[in-house]
Image: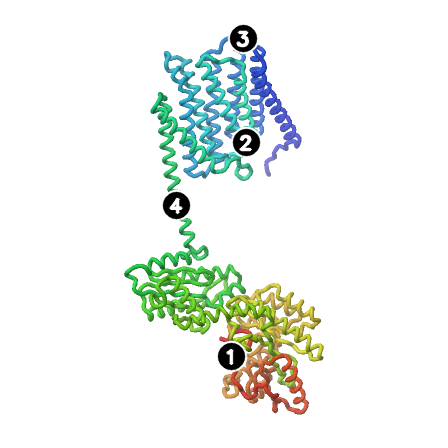
């Protein structure tokens, strides 16, 4: 059973707050009366008004403090200590007021001095507790600033109070003389403590922290001025100066109330000064101490003041040394950060330039090689698995490269998926061997969030001094060589002088591609797919071409790799989809309802908005969903099965047909055929071409056809170029065929003409599978393929 806790009345806090607020207003009004009375009144009336109002005000301060103690208990040590200190000094002032009211002089020593002396250690202890509570974890530099500020304030006060100290030491030893020295010294300690704490800038002490600072300074200031006046014999009781004690105690009480309410936490308090406060206090204290030492060389200054000034300067020197050390550390950290890749922790391009320049400038450096490495198909990892997985892959690649380099080699990440390795003292053959070795290392499998991937890399090599005498030249030429390696799929390439021309052509072609996308230079050709069972044509594949203004009609192998590398593939896919659906709408208006197949790359399929955008494209042309078929590759399916399932399911739910292009050439897996919504498999031409003469190839085709039919899918054979192949596919039960035997990809107008000829020939021939109609220009003359790219992406 939990302990029963007393239920506090909801009205109690409100009543307590009202009483406390009323008392604080009364305290303020009484102090105003005391200050004004000290200016406007004279004689005994002035003493009565000033001291009477002040006494009542300080006791109200004590009452407010005790009300706070009763509310928070003894868990806040600074609140209790400050409350006792305020109460103690209130008693002292009351005793002195009674003595003055009786007409007697102020005694040099009295019982009130004990209560007065108690105020200082109690208040200093409250400050220590408050600072410990609120300033944990402050660096040593801040504490040094506090010490310098305290010592500087003490130095100045030692000079100001020197007449009192000298006078007290001049007479015979007595209790009064001791007290005359004790009070100024205690005031000096109190002001020094407050000055030191001011260096904290109130950053953690709460919004009422400056109230306490002002209050204690007012208290100590009044006490020191009165001490100086009494020493000089000019003190007059009942002036506004007497209210300084009351003002100091009242402001202390306000701070106690704020501390009792929990102010002071860094998350709730307002900062009343910035971090520059510490430096300002330290600088002022140092300047003051220098001034005291200069004055001491021309006039008499107390030994205490000179000593304190010297210690202050020593503290300031230590603080300066610490500041320079911190600046050095910060500069080193900033320099390291500027030269370090944030993701992998490897040196970055800036560091490569610095270290490379130093290495190549050494007289002993006679030969070197710069290798630029670029991960193949890294964009697909980002698109399919997300950028976090891509970052993990880069980190693992960086660690693996670092493990397999020599001690003097320089490894850096240039940015994105590019790395650079600067090899010292290697020949042409050694640099090539090193590139091959690094490619073999990176060919190992990587595990990213439970998915195992195999990574390949293209490496460009530039040699020093043959290809350049500085790192900038080497980097540019190694980058050109890397691209040549990527395009040729050779894995590595050693820079040659002719590569420069190719690189300029590549950059120019990329810019021309951007223009082609917005100026309708891209055209779509259509290749029919014949139903092998009936000879009818109900579908076609859309294949992109570039009608270049200078170079004429370009096939995909001339530009599609650049499109993918430059990140233009999503834009190209949108253009092809739009053109193909516009043509489908035109054919439908002419009474020709054909299904158009459009290839989509992995970078286009990762778009979560793709299903909605495709549906909107069809709806805008009033086309039924089955008019569109999307052909995708196995790479997208195998890279991220969950993402593929989500996007394909949404597309299939909207009525879009899904076809797997180039089936059998990628990372095939029977599991995705079972799990994913797929309508059709397109068997790659590499299986179709040899089947007429190769029994094993024919067996593979037959088994694949049976597999597709068993899973409820259509089987399409692509790359059909002979009548024998056509007939064998029909015998095996393949559903559709496309290839040069039937027709090349042709523009839409020619396709319409071809389709009419095909249907006319079919009506004449009763056995289209034995005598295939071959319209003029169809490609039956077995012209070799016009490139290795006819499916919207490079073939491996």
Of pointers 3 and 2, the one earlier in the residue sequence: 3
Dividing the image into 4 quarters, which one contains the N terminus? Answer: top right
Report the disc number at residue 787.
1
Q: Residue furthest top?
A: 103
Image coordinates of residue 217 in percent, x first then y, are: 49, 25
**Number of marks:** 4
Mark 3 near mark 4, Cβ–Cβ under 8 Å? no
Distance of label 3 from label 4 (alpha carbons) = 68 Å
Image coordinates of residue 630 in percent, x first then y, are: 61, 72
Above or below, 51 relative to 143: above
Residue picked out by circle 4: 329
Residue picked out by circle 2: 208
Distance of label 2 from label 1 (alpha carbons) = 81 Å
Distance of label 4 from label 1 (alpha carbons) = 60 Å
Look at the numbered disc 2 and give the secondary structure of its residue: loop
770 sits left or right of 292 in the view: right
Mark 4 near mark 1, Cβ–Cβ under 8 Å? no
Above or below, 159 relative to 661: above
Of pointers 4 and 1, the one earlier in the residue sequence: 4
Closer to the camera in the image, 11 or 778? 778
Residue 706 shows in this picture: yes
- Callout 1: 10 Å neighbours few (<14), some, many (20+)? few
């Amino acid at each position: 059973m939990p302990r029963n806790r007393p239920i506090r009345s909801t009205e109690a806090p409100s009543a307590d707050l009202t009483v406390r607020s009323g008392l604080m207003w009364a305290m303020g009004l009484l102090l105003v009366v005391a200050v004004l009375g000290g200016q406007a009144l004279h004689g005994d009336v002035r003493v009565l008004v000033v001291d009477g109002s002040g006494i009542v005000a300080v006791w109200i301060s004590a009452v407010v403090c005790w009300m706070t103690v009763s509310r928070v208990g003894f868990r806040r040590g600074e609140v209790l200590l400050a409350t006792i200190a305020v109460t103690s000094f209130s008693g002292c002032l009351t005793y002195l007021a009674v003595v003055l009211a009786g007409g007697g002089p102020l005694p040099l020593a009295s019982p009130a001095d004990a209560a007065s002396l108690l105020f200082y250690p109690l208040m200093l202890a409250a400050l220590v507790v408050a600072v410990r509570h609120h300033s944990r974890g402050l660096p040593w530099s801040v504490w040094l600033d506090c010490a310098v500020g305290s010592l500087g304030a003490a130095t100045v006060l030692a000079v100001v109070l020197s007449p009192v100290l000298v006078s007290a030491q001049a007479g015979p030893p007595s209790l009064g003389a001791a007290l005359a020295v004790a009070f100024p010294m205690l005031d000096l300690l109190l002001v020094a403590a407050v000055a030191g704490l001011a260096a904290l800038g109130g950053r953690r002490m709460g919004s009422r922290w400056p109230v306490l600072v002002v209050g204690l300074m007012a208290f100590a200031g009044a006490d020191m001025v009165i001490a100086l006046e009494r020493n000089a014999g000019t003190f007059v009781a009942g002036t506004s100066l007497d209210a300084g004690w009351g003002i100091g105690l009242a402001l202390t009480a306000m701070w106690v109330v704020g501390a009792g309410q929990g102010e002071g936490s860094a998350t709730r308090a307002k900062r009343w000064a910035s971090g520059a406060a510490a430096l300002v206090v330290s600088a002022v204290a140092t300047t003051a101490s220098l001034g005291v030492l200069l004055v001491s060389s021309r006039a008499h200054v107390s030994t205490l003041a000179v000593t304190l000034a010297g210690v202050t300067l020593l503290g300031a020197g230590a603080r300066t040394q610490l500041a320079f050390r911190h600046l050095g550390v910060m500069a080193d950290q900033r320099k390291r950060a500027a030269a370090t890749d944030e993701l992998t922790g490897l040196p970055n391009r800036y560091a490569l330039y610095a270290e490379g320049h130093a290495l190549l400038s050494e007289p002993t450096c006679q030969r070197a090689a710069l290798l630029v490495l670029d991960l193949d198909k890294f964009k697909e990892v980002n698109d399919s698995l997300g950028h976090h997985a891509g970052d993990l892959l880069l980190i693992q690649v960086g660690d693996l490269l670092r493990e397999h380099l020599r001690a003097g080699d320089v490894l850096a990440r240039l940015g994105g998926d590019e790395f650079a390795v600067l090899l010292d003292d290697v020949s042409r053959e050694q640099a090539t061997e090193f590139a091959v070795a690094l490619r073999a290392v990176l060919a190992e499998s990587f595990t990213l969030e439970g998915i195992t991937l195999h990574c390949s890399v293209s490496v460009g090599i530039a040699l020093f001094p043959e290809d350049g005498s500085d790192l900038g030249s080497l980097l540019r030429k190694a980058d050109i060589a890397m691209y040549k390696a990527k395009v040729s799929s050779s894995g590595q390439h050693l820079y040659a002088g002719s590569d420069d021309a190719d690189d300029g052509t590549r950059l120019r072609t990329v810019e021309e591609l951007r223009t082609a996308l917005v100026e309708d230079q891209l055209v779509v050709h259509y290749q029919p797919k014949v139903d092998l069972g009936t000879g009818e044509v109900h579908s076609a594949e859309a294949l992109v071409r570039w009608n270049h203004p200078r170079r004429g009609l370009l096939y995909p192998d001339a530009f599609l790799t650049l499109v993918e590398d430059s990140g233009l593939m999503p834009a190209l896919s949108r253009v092809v989809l739009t053109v193909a659906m516009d043509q489908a709408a035109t054919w439908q208006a002419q009474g020709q309802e054909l299904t158009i197949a459009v290839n989509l790359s992995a970078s286009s399929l990762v778009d979560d908005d793709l299903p909605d955008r495709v549906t909107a494209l069809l709806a805008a042309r009033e086309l039924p969903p089955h008019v569109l078929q999307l052909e995708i590759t196995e790479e997208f399916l195998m890279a991220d099965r969950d993402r593929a399932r989500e996007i394909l399911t949404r597309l299939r739910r909207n009525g879009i047909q899904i076809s797997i292009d180039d089936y059998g050439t990628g990372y095939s897996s029977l599991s995705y055929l079972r799990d994913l919504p797929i309508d059709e498999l397109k068997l790659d031409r590499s299986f179709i071409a040899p089947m007429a003469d190769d029994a094993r190839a024919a067996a593979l085709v037959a088994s694949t056809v049976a597999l597709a039919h068993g899973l409820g899918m259509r089987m399409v054979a692509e790359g059909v170029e002979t009548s024998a192949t056509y007939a064998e596919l029909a015998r095996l039960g393949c559903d559709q065929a496309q290839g040069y035997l039937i027709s090349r990809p042709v523009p839409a107008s020619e396709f319409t003409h071809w389709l009419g000829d095909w249907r006319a020939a079919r009506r004449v021939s009763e056995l289209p599978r034995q005598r295939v109609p071959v319209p003029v220009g169809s490609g039956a003359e077995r012209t070799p393929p016009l490139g290795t790219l006819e499916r919207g992406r490079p073939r491996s």
